[in-house]
């Protein structure tokens, strides 16, 4: 009879679309749910709704993903709540609930990674989003997502660890260089454009602009800064290769970039002199 109750209650929740239904309940969880379905459903929906709202406030969540994520959260919270009905020690209950959280986190992160660089890093986010446009196969996209999930798990354990080198070294194993470069160009282009516009404004302010075409100068500076960003990303953690490629790029600096470099050196020199002057004036003898 208890088995029949379980089948009726849980099967209804899965087939009706109330649960995500991607992780099977354990036998103990099944029995507890069969006997306490109404209370657990109420609790799961309340806590799951709060969890989704918290996620939406913290991350970019697509409307098309919100329904599935809500089901994940409800199912997760119901499973965790079943352990409050079991005769476990508090420590054991906590461990079981942590295991369930970990079980569902990958499915949550898989929906977040393409639109939230903070989850697994900007490079992985861009690689997932652009995989199709750069000609990567669905299998390769799956490997990128798997890499992102692995990085996300490790970042949750150690948020301060620097994973950029490991990410890039891994991406090299299943993306061609031209595919990776195209992804990195897209990643760096917006920041490069902003830097190029700022360089132009600096040059105008310092009176260095005479007959230069602003559009052409900014475009060339943007191309340069984009290439610089690509090199820094592509060879992160490989200093000799990074410096070799940067040295070759530096020889091709456009005029606006050279002017901005001169302005920056002038500013740095002025700041150093002012700092030295303050230090000298503070001496008592």
Image (cartoon, helix red, strand yellow):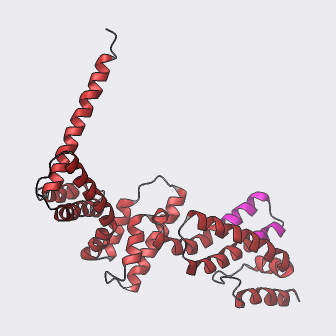
**Residue 7 part of the magenta segment:** no
Which image quarter holds the C terminus?
A: top left
Horizontal side, residue 133 vs residue 160: left or right: left
Question: Where is residue 215, by image quadrant?
Answer: bottom left
Residue at screen point 24% across, 49% down: 202
Measuring from the top left, give residue 228's x and y in whole percent. Answer: 23, 60
Looking at the image, which is closer to me, 259 or 161? 259
Figure check: 16 above or below 82: below
Residue at screen point 52% across, 74% down: 110
Looking at the image, which is closer to me, 90 or 267? 267
Residue at screen point 54% across, 76% down: 62
Measuring from the top left, give residue 197's x and y in whole percent. Answer: 26, 58
Q: Residue furthest right?
A: 1
**Residue 92 part of the magenta segment:** yes
Number of residue marks: 0
Q: Main secondary structure of the magenta part?
A: helix
Looking at the image, which is closer to me, 22 or 201? 201
Measuring from the top left, give residue 22's x and y in whole percent. Answer: 63, 83
Residues shaded magenta: 81-98
User: Is residue 273 in view?
Assistant: yes
């Amino acid at each position: 009879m208890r088995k029949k109750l379980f089948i009726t209650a849980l099967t209804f929740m899965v087939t009706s679309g109330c649960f995500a239904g991607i992780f099977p309940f354990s036998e103990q969880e099944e029995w507890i749910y069969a006997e306490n379905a109404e209370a657990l459903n109420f609790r799961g929906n309340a806590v799951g709704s709060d969890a989704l709202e918290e996620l939406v406030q913290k991350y970019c969540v697509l409307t098309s993903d919100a329904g599935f994520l809500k089901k994940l959260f409800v199912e997760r919270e119901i499973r965790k709540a079943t352990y409050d009905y079991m005769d476990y020690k508090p420590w054991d209950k906590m461990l079981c609930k942590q295991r369930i959280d970990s079980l569902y986190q990958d499915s949550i992160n898989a929906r977040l990674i393409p639109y939230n660089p903070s989850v697994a890093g900007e490079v992985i986010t861009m690689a997932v989003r652009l995989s199709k446009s750069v000609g990567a196969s669905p299998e390769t996209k799956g490997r990128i997502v798997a890499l992102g999930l692995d990085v996300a798990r490790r970042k949750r354990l150690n948020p301060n660890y620097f994973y950029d080198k490991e990410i890039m070294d891994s991406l090299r194993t299943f993306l061609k260089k031209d595919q990776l470069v195209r992804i990195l160009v897209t990643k760096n282009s917006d920041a490069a454009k902003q830097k190029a516009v700022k360089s132009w404004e600096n040059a105008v302010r310092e009176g260095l602009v005479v007959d230069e075409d602003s559009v052409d100068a900014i475009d060339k500076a943007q191309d340069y800064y984009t290439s610089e960003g690509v090199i820094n990303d592509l060879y992160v953690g490989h200093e000799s290769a990074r410096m070799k490629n940067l040295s070759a790029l530096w020889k091709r600096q456009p005029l606006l970039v050279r002017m901005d470099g001169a302005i920056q050196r002038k500013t740095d020199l002025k700041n150093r002199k002012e700092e030295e002057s303050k230090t000298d004036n503070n001496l008592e003898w």
